[in-house]
Amino acid sequence: MVVEILLGGLALLLLVPALVLLIQVLMALREHVPRAYPKGARPAVAVLVPAHDESLVIADTLRSLLPQLKEHDRLLVVADNCTDSTAEIARKEGAEVIERSNREHRGKGYALEFGVRHLEKDPPEVLVIVDADCTIDRGVIDQLAECSHATGLPVQALYLMHSPKNANLKARVAEFAWVVKNHVRALGFHRLGLPCQLMGTGMAFPWSVIQKTHLGNGNIVEDLKLGIDLARSGTPALFCPDAVVSSTFPGNSEGVSSQRTRWEHGHLGIILHVAPRFMWDALCRRDVKQLALALDLCVPPLSLMVLLALSIFACSVIVFLMFGRLTALSISSFVLIAIATSVMAAWIGYGKKVITLVDLACVPFYVLWKIPLYVKFVFSRQAEWVRSKRDESKP
């Protein structure tokens, strides 16, 4: 029967990322055995902060960075197409500031390229990239720099995003989904000795690696693209879970919607257009680490994964009731069980501080709220970088 074959095929296709997610979560729940990275002398560091109209938050970010820098380190802010006082505030806080103005080539990737080329005149040993709206825990710069310098590989800190005080259910569920993606899944692969995706901030690179990398592009998920490019060149990123960088979701619904659309449309675009070639390349090269990274890349956003699993399961139930066919129903049931087990295990191990069990039970309503975002991906995909609107009431 054609319908059952189609549903069974879709269920099998979704089973792969569901199993990847389950393995990552279960590995993250293992008893913690710290992986010892080689350490050497603390290298000279340049911290690069790309900033576009970040006058509300950049001072706090720089104040968390400056005490961690040594005598020969540099703190460089790229004020990119700014129309506010970002550059002036950064200079007052003690950062080196360069300004970039190019209305045609906009986006974080272009700002990073501009900063890296500026640093070529007096290059550091390690470059650390930090977004202008982040708080960097004490000791993070030392951890990232020493690990990257000793291994010769990019290193990714644990990047967490928190919901604002008195946040609504959507914000709390979004924070939990972020914990699953950036903490639980990355930690699971880390404990298997596998690389992680780059997360956009809290990233350290040996200068010999980053100077050869082309960063100037308008990709709306430039961090994912950069991680893929580096893995292809033989330098996949390591995860450093003890180094924590944090930020806060925008405090207004417009900012949250814009940010979520950019992230998820960009990720889905990567899954459709980049991941298949990336996986094929890994198979041809017999590169286990690149293959693992490709499989991780193919795990869709958690809400979309739940939505697809529920839809396929519901259609499979109808086929079973009408024609008595069990194959698609069996596979889709297994997919749902794998996803549900992963979500519950992640909540038990890492999510209790973020959302309650009652909140977790409301996830289906959160998934329904996301449907317009995915419909928009099909009919009106966001392809250009757009800055998320922040809470203008913040002092």
Image (cartoon, rainbow, N blue to C red):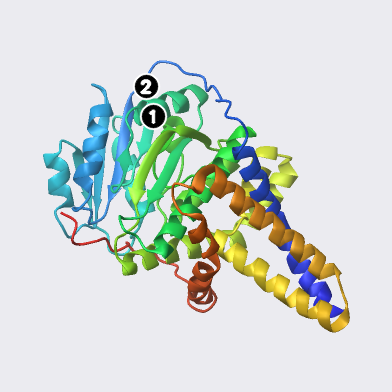
Residue 12 at x, y = what percent?
77, 62
Q: Is residue 107 left or right of residue 153?
A: left
**For mark 2, does the 10 Å Cα neighbourhood hold few (<14), some (14 to 19), or many (20 or more) residues?**
many
**Mark 2 → mark 1, Cα distance in angstroms:** 7 Å
Residue 355 at x, y = what percent?
46, 54
Q: Is residue 105 above or below residue 198?
A: below
Along the viewing direction, whichever of 338 and 8 lies nearer the viewer: 338
The image quadrant where one finds the C terminus is bottom left
Disc 1 is placed on an element classified as: strand
Q: Is residue 265 left or right of residue 278?
A: left
Q: Which residue is mark 1?
A: 126
Residue 208 at x, y = what percent?
45, 31
In the image, what residue type sits under mark 1? Val
Residue drawn at (61%, 64%), measured in percent from left and top?
306
Corner quadrant of residue 134: top left
Q: Is residue 276 above or below residue 112?
A: below
Number of the label disc, if any, that sits on residue 43: 2
N-terminal of the pair, mark 2 or mark 1, is 2
Corner quadrant of residue 236: top right
The image quadrant where one finds the N terminus is bottom right
Asked if residue 290 shows in the view, the reply is: no
Residue drawn at (26%, 55%), measured in percent from left and top?
52
Along the viewing direction, whichever of 252 and 94 lies nearer the viewer: 252
Residue drawn at (30%, 55%), measured in percent from left and top?
165
Residue 194 at x, y = what percent?
62, 36
Number of the label disc, if any, that sits on residue 154: none
Q: Is residue 378 left or right of residue 382?
A: right
Asked if residue 63 shows in the view, the reply is: yes
Residue drawn at (44%, 50%), measured in percent from left and top?
354
Q: Is residue 222 above or below residue 388?
A: above
Q: Are discs 2 and 1 less than 8 Å apart at CB? A: yes
Disc 2 is placed on an element classified as: loop
